[in-house]
Amino acid sequence: MVSYSSSEMKRNMPSPCDILSYLPDNVIENILIFLPLRDAVKTSVLSKKWRRNWGPILKFTLSLPGFKCCPEIKHLISFLARNDIQDLTLCFSSSDWSRGSPKLLETIFACLQLRHLHLSYCLFDPPPTFEGFDNLISIEFQDVPFEVDILKTFICKCPLLERLTLKGCFYIGNLDIDAPKLKFLYIHARWHATFLPSNAYRKALKNSETSVIIGFFRSLPVIESLNVGYQCWQFLAAGNVPDRLPANLKYLKTLELPALRFEFLREFSCALCLIRSSPNLQKLRLGVGYTKSDTADNVKTVDKFVESQDFSDISLNKLREVEMQINDFSKPEMEFVKLLLVKSPLLETMHIRQRDGDFYNGYRILKEVTRFRRASSTAEIIYFGPNEKP
């Protein structure tokens, strides 16, 4: 049996002026739930115990028209780190480029519970002491400059990364990604970004047995959605292009090639390589890249390549939706349409949009397309002429 003297009981009882510090947690939680956010934050001044009582901040967005590295922002990021921030967005103004890109505060790398990180218009340079974001699953960087090896090192320290989006990022260099759990990759580099190797190196690749595409997809074994922009597409088509990848992209469900040029043999064969290697593809979107007439391969060369192909190893048993932009219904384009129709037993819709050319000639060719043999009896072909809206 434990007994207390009256003096001991008095010492253990909260003083009347500090009774707030001893309220039960469920009472504090109910109070905060019914307060507006601004008032809930103000409760942090009531006592030492209440400083963190207004709860963890799971998501926070900060958008500033102009960046000034002031102590308030540093303290704010530190506060978010202490409150287990999981989804953080920092957007600065594009006008800040004229004064030099704002450097990201090092306090952000103390946000160890982060799961989603979105940065715009700022320098990204993790400190040497940064050990990684163990819980980070998605990254979106827009107009964020990097040193050559920064991105590679950073991604290696994010073992759970599933989604990577890079828009207009500078100085990416030869992109080297080691992310075994990556499921979604979107890269949209600016024209002057250095995603492509140098001209000399690219020329050497063109005449070598090196396969860029094999090395690229070796690092993306569980990719589920892929959008390959113009510069990246040229990069993948450099060097020797195999008929198919050594290992199938069995998780890939959505493939977007917005800059495919059917007149270029390497790009055409690269597209076939990806399709051969994607047995579980469900959605395919094909655009048309700009082509100068004096740089395109001879169409007859591409035609001969198509005639030499054995398409018996292509299986698109799960493909349901195709969106395809075409130029002038060239033979390579028509053969590609024919291939997709005959290899897709579950196909539901095929949208064909004519970018240029004669409107009436497009309808004439469309009649021919509708006569192509289809593996799916329910597949619907929908045609949009030049400048025609869906």
Image (tube, helix red, strand yellow):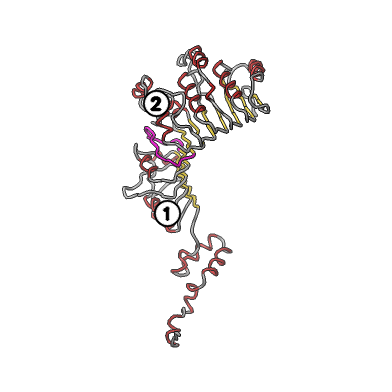
Q: Residues within 10 Å of mark 2 (few under 14, many from 20)?
A: some
Mark 1 Cα within 10 Å, few/some/many (few <14, many 20+)?
many
Q: Position of residue 388 (x, y in %)?
A: 64, 25
Residue highlighted by disc 2: 211
Residue topped by disc 1: 77
Residue type at numbered disc 2: Ser
Residue 228 appears in the rendering: yes
Read off the magenta span: 166-183
Marks 1 and 2, the one that precedes in the sequence: 1
Cα gap from disc 1 to disc 2, whole angstroms: 44 Å
Give the quarter of the image for residue 12: bottom left
Q: Quadrant of the N terminus?
A: bottom left
Which SS class for mark 1? helix
Q: Position of residue 103 (x, y in %)?
A: 37, 45
Please give the name of the residue rendered at 46% of the width and 35% of the height, measured from the top-left corner.
187
Residue 320, given in percent of the width and then of the height, sits at: 61, 32
Residue 123 seen? no
Query: Quick one: 348 or 62, which is closer to the camera?
Result: 348
Q: Is residue 384 above or below residue 100?
A: above
Q: Residue furthest front?
A: 312
The residue lying at 48 percent from left, 41 percent from top is 163
